[in-house]
Structure formats: structure tokens, C-alpha cells
Amino acid sequence: MLQRRLPAALTPFTRLACPPATSTATVALPRSHQSTFTASPSPSAPHPFPAGDSGHSAPHHHGDIDFCDTSTSFKHKSSLELARSATIFNLCKVKPLVQNASKLIGCTRKVAGDQLTDWALKQTFFKQFCGGEQLSDLHNTMAALSSHGVGSILDYAAEKDLHSPSSTVSPSDINAELDINCHHTIDALRASQAQTAKGYAAVKLTSLATPQLLVKVSDVVRDMEAAFDAFIGVSTGEDRNTASLDRVTFAKKAAEVWGAGEWGEAFDKVAKDGRLGYAQFMGEFGPCGEHYGGAGLSEAEREEWAKVVERVGRVAAECEALGSVSVLIDAEQTYMQPAIEYVTLQAMRTHNKERAVVYNTYQGYLKKCEERLLLGIAQAHAEGFHLGVKLVRGAYMYQERRLAAEKGYEDPICRSLEDTHASYDGCVAHILDSLHRIEVVLGTHNEQSIKKAVAGLHLRGLSPTSPRVAFAQLLGMCDHITFKLGASGFAAYKYVPYGPIKEVLPYLLRRAEENSDLLGSSGKETLLILQELAGRSLHLQPRRRFA
């Protein structure tokens, strides 16, 4: 609640942005997960840490966080910055503008030139959603965030898609560029170590591998998963997390599917206790494994894939050496995601023995998100590593649906927003039930999901400010959430992308498209900003500028 009185003309902003508080007990949970959220901790599974061990002095939270406290959330921003935010958010509501942004920018470059176009972007969308063009630009931003209890997740935001031009570039030049991107990620990891909070850096695998190769490897991973299903005699992935093969069955099925070979001897080298489960099968016989036969990839592609695996390993090894830093592997489009998830989980097998060094990203808007998460949890238990999870809703919805319609396959996205909410909150419940083997970054702008997660921690007898649970929002969005969480003692982070304007343009366009829906549905943040600006104009209260 604001500690100042607003004129009658502005009270609708207050009512719209801040409805009456709802107690935790009345927060509606997805029907299929209500019992999971209210379950008591299992007496047979000791809690990984006692309540209050996070180092924070915050009170015990039951999910009743006030996200309408603008005096806390916006005190770090000048009125000019708030006005810029409100203007950009309102522009994002104009769907024709957002949908044609790429064409408009292209036309502007032709008419006004690159220099003027880049300057205009830097003063508006780039300044709102990005930390700078290079790592040295981020120091002031990181320091300012840290002073308000908010950490930084650094992200060199170069990304590519299948339509990115590469056919005219030589393989050696492509690999040189990918190696440079790898160095950028390692530099970000080192910079993130400087903050007092646990350090994170994010990386898109399309900055370490070509999209074309990721698509090919994704096809191989799907074929391997189908082979495992055929070996165990099921048609879906539901039983992958519990099923296993004996030596005779594996050797017989492998000969049928892959042809003659010394499959029995290969089984003996990798099987545990005479059984071969999904995790060992994919790890040893998949495209990262010692016994991979190369089906589906040419010799040149296998060599390129080995370089990708080496880059991911280099990044993970740097995290281990730094000690308190982790890397978040971002999710991308579903036609590349199997390869991304596969190499990420293989890196976890090697580097996540003591803590979550490498995190995989799960997208709650995908119909199979819970299935993939449960499979990852089962792999972590089977292999004895800590599962690093970044859970988001997803940022490629329009593209995914367009492609599914064009290619004639099933839309991978949940049918409705309510289904996406249920998927996300259900995944949170599964994570909290296995928190002793999981470390998680909950990347969400949804207040109710955050409150449910906090309530879920409390109901399990876990510290609401657990060091195993972090919350993250994008730079330039939902400050009323992030800064309130930080002020309340939670592990709160901002995703801070950076990079040359032309390389981060795909990121900026996706942010604008995402904001179009987010702001069009509620517009709460804009209303809170207007509320704060109105209060400042009445009281002429200066605010410190955000560096």
C-alpha cells in the first residue's frame, strides 16, 4: 500500500493494479496438484536444510507478499525512467506495431541508416531490456541491483535460428565465431562471481552450435528415445523413468534395430547391477556416448558435435572452478530442444555431483513439460547428480504454433493459458517434492505462481528463503515483483542480457512480442508505474537514478 493519499481521479489505478489481498489459504491450485502442494514432508526424507539457513533475516512467508508496494519496488528508478518504461509497455500493446517490428526496423535502416536506427533502439527498447553492449557496461547495473537485494543473471544474448544465414560462411569461420561466444560466456561467469549473491550466467546453445546441427542431433535423440521405448515395449515416454533392460533383451533388441555388433559386451561396460535404465542408455549410446554408432550423423557432423560438447564442458568446468557460479542453458525452439536438453543433462552427469553447476531449462507452456521434468528428476536419482532446473513458461509460442500449422504436426503448446499455469505450478510441486536433489531458478512474471511456490515451501517445512530456490524476472519487466522479493529476503534475480545491438535484436523482438500479451491481459505494472508517478508529482519526492 502507498503511504500517501492519491486524488480521486487516480483511485481507479489503485483498484485495478492492487485488488484486495487474498490469503494463502484461498489461492486456487490446479486440481490435479492440490494434494501435492498441501502434503506434509515425508518423515523418511530428511530436509536438506533447516528453516532459515539461507543467511537472510527475512520473516517467514506464507505466500502473502504485497506486490503492490511501489515505494519499495520503484524507489531505485527516476521518474524519467518510469515514464520511459510506461511508454514502452504501452507501445508493446500495439499488436500491429509488434508484429511488424522487424520489417519496420529494416525500413528504418534503409531510410535513416544503421547509425540513427541503432541510436533510436538503444535509447528505447535496448535501454529498457538490456544491460549494455559489452560486459564492462554492466558493472553499474549489477551494483545498483545488488544494493537493493537483487542479483544478476548475465546473458550474452546472441542467438540464431534456422533462417540465420550460414551457408556462405566457411565451417572454420563458424567455429571461430562459436568459440568466441564460448569465451563471452566464460567471461560472464567470471563477472557474475563478483556479486555477493550466488552467481549465474545464461547461455543459448545456438551461440555454441549451429541451429542446423542442433536440428540434426535432435532427430538422433528422438530416434534414440524411440529405440529405448521399442526395447522396453512401450509407445510413450511415461515409463522411461522406471523401466530398465537386462543383458539378453538389450543385446537382442540392439541387433534387431542397429544391426550385428558386440552389444552384450557393450552392455556389460555400462549397465549397473545387471540392468540398463534410460539414463545410462541415452548417456552411453546417444550422440554424447562412448558407444554411439553414429547413425543419423555424417562424419563431419559428428566432429562438429564433439566440438559443441567440448564447449559446453569448458563452460561447466569453469563454473566448477569458480565455486559459487552456475550456468543456465536456455531453452529454445522445440525442433532444437531435444539436442539442447540432451547435452545439458550429459554435462550434469559429469559436473553436478556436488551441486547444481549446470541447469536445464524446462518450458511450462509445452504439453510435455511435466513428463520431461520427471524424466530429468529420475535421471538425477539414478545417476546420483543434482538436477539444475530453470523453470519458465516459454517465449516462442507464436513461432511454435506457426510452424506446427505449416508442417501439419500437433501444436506442442498447451491449449490455453490456464493449462500453461497448471503445467507450470505442477512442475513447481514436483520440484519442491524433490528439493534435496534439485536446485531451481523459477523464472516467472506470474505473481500467483510465486505465491504458490512460497506457500509450497512453507507447507513442506522448508525455508521460504531457501538457497536452493531462486526467483528471476527479465530486466526491464516486473520490477514490482523482483524488488519486493529482494527486499523480503528471497533470492531474487534480474536476467541481464547484453551484446551488440544487431546480435540481440532477435531477443528484443521476442521481448516486445511477449510483452504484447503480458501487458495486454492485465497491464498491472503500467498502472503501478502511473500510480507511483502520480504520488511523486503530488509530493515532489526525488528518486535516486538507477545506474
Image (cartoon, rainbow, N blue to C red):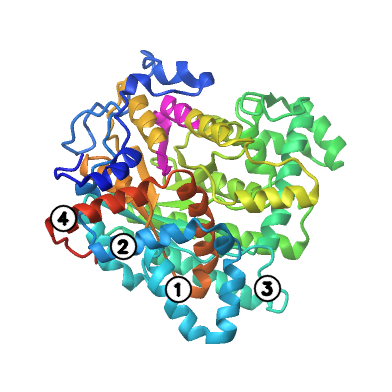
Residue 33 falls left or right of residue 168 = left
SS for tag 4?
helix
Q: CA distance from mark 3 to mark 4?
A: 53 Å
Residue closer to the observer: 345 or 268: 345
Residue 274 falls left or right of residue 349 = right
Pick whichever of labels 4 and 2 is earlier in the sequence.
2
Pick whichever of labels 2 and 1 is earlier in the sequence.
2
The residue tagged 1 is: 121
The residue tagged 2 is: 83
Residue closer to the observer: 352 or 371: 371
Range drawn in magenta: 427-446
Pick whichever of labels 2 and 3 is earlier in the sequence.
2
Tag 3 near tag 4, CB within 8 Å? no
SS for tag 1?
helix
Residue 270 falls left or right of residue 78 = right
Q: Can residue 392 be seen by looking at this rendering?
A: yes
Q: In x, y percent, where is residue 227?
A: 77, 36
Q: In x, y percent, where is residue 492?
A: 30, 46
Q: Residue at x 36, y 43 (%)?
A: 471
Q: Residue at x 32, y 26 (%)?
A: 22
Pick whichever of labels 3 and 4 is earlier in the sequence.
3
Amino acid type, label 2 = Ala
Q: Quadrant of the C terminus?
A: bottom left
Q: CA distance from mark 2 to mark 1?
A: 17 Å
Q: In x, y percent, where is residue 151?
A: 29, 52
Tag 1 near tag 4, CB within 8 Å? no
The residue tagged 3 is: 165
> Is 284 part of what is drawn in magenta?
no
The residue tagged 4 is: 538
Q: Which mark is residue 62?
A: none
Dot 4: within a 10 Å radius of its alpha carbon, few (fewer than 14), some, or many (20 or more) residues? few
